[in-house]
Image (spheres, rainbow, N blue to C red):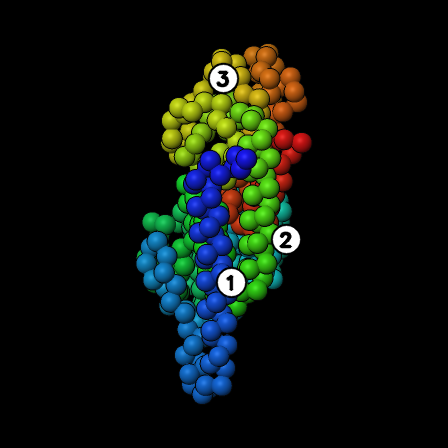
Amino acid sequence: MFKMFKKKGFVLSVLLFMISVVGLTACSSAGNTGSQESSKETVEAEVLTITHELGETTLEKNPQKVIVFDYATLDTLNQMGVEVMGLPKSNIPQYLEKYNDSQYADVGTLFEPNYEKIYELQPDLIFISGRQADLYEEFEKIAPTVYLTIDTQDYIGSFGKNLTTLGEIFEKEDFVQNQSQKIQEKITKLNQEVIASEKKALVIMANDGALNAYGKGSRFNIIHNEFGFAAADENIEVANHGQSISFEYIVEKNPEIIFVIDRAAVTGGTTGAEQVLDNDLVKMTDAYKNDAIHYLSSHIWYVASGGLEGTNIMIEEAQAAIQ
């Protein structure tokens, strides 16, 4: 009757996601009871301590001078209407191209921050993610730094936690609750429809002619875990760069749906994914015959997954595969 509930991990993720949001709302309501406290106590209440994977960061609510090294966080702040002062401008996803404007400072690249520029800007808060994890202590020397990342084994849970953290910092709790509910409803609906379709999918990254497959437990695990697509191959090696595959492998597994991330489109490669997959062997698959090879928004899936708008786009792209 309820096929989707055979995926216990998905159900647990949704429950944890909603608990985190409800918890935030409750804390917010409790905080309102102290509105008649002295001005000194009010000032003290504006100071937060955020616990994250790399430590604890103490900061003031509603920081005005914010630098962001994570495009997913930038995405969510943009949806919240929170301004930032600086970011790395290389590889900005197209849907965030407004941040290429000169009013936003360029603070280096995702892997090579311009510390001198960052220090010059004197930020109140810096956001970083996995690509800057090893540089956390260097950022902390300049300003309070919060580390936000997505757990690929629990996308929706970690997404909800990050959204909650940002809502708390910038006092956007109502916005967070509203958007969280919408995301949960969309993913639940998609999961039900995908499981009912019983279609098997293969996730491929094309990189200038090379092909790598990603399965359950990989960086694109959301396809299988949260969205519910069965895997065309249950034994794909779980590795950061995926499992190297051949065209013969694709024919052998014969997926009904192929999702494609084009790394060359992100890094400036010379051979695009569509060119790579324009191959007689690929044309033998059910995915090709049924027009079910779907080219995903590579900048989002590869460098910006975890943001609010990006997650909505990811859901829409997965939804299109079963229409």
Tag 2–tag 3 contact (CB < 8 Å): no
Q: Quadrant of residue 191?
A: top right
Q: Is residue 104 visible?
A: no
Q: CA distance from mark 2 to mark 3?
A: 41 Å
Q: Is residue 228 visible?
A: yes
Q: Quadrant of residue 245?
A: top left
Q: Residue at x 60, y 41 (%)?
A: 189
Check the picture and name the quadrant holding the C terminus. Answer: top right
Q: Residue at x 45, y 29 (%)?
A: 214
Q: Amino acid at mark 2?
A: Lys
Point out which mark residue 18 bears.
Answer: none
Depth order, front residue of 262/229: 229
Q: Amino acid at mark 3?
A: Lys
Q: Circle 3 is placed at which residue position?
A: 253
124 sits left or right of 195 in the view: left
Depth order, front residue of 86/224: 224
Whichever of labels 1 and 2 marks the residue nearer the N terminus, that label is: 2
Point out which mark residue 98 bears.
Answer: 2
Tag 3–tag 1 contact (CB < 8 Å): no
Q: Position of residue 135 (x, y in %)?
A: 35, 52
Q: Quadrant of residue 277?
A: top right
Which of the two marks, 1 or 2, is nearer to us in this view? Answer: 1
Point out which mark residue 167 bears.
Answer: 1
Q: CA distance from mark 3 to mark 1?
A: 43 Å
Tag 1–tag 2 contact (CB < 8 Å): no
Q: In the figure, 14 relative to 294: above or below?
A: below
Which of the two marks, 2 or 3, is nearer to us in this view? Answer: 3
Assign a secondary structure to mark 1.
helix
Whichever of labels 3 and 1 marks the residue nearer the N terminus, that label is: 1
Q: Residue at x 41, y 73 (%)?
A: 47
239 sits left or right of 296 in the view: left
Assign a secondary structure to mark 2.
helix
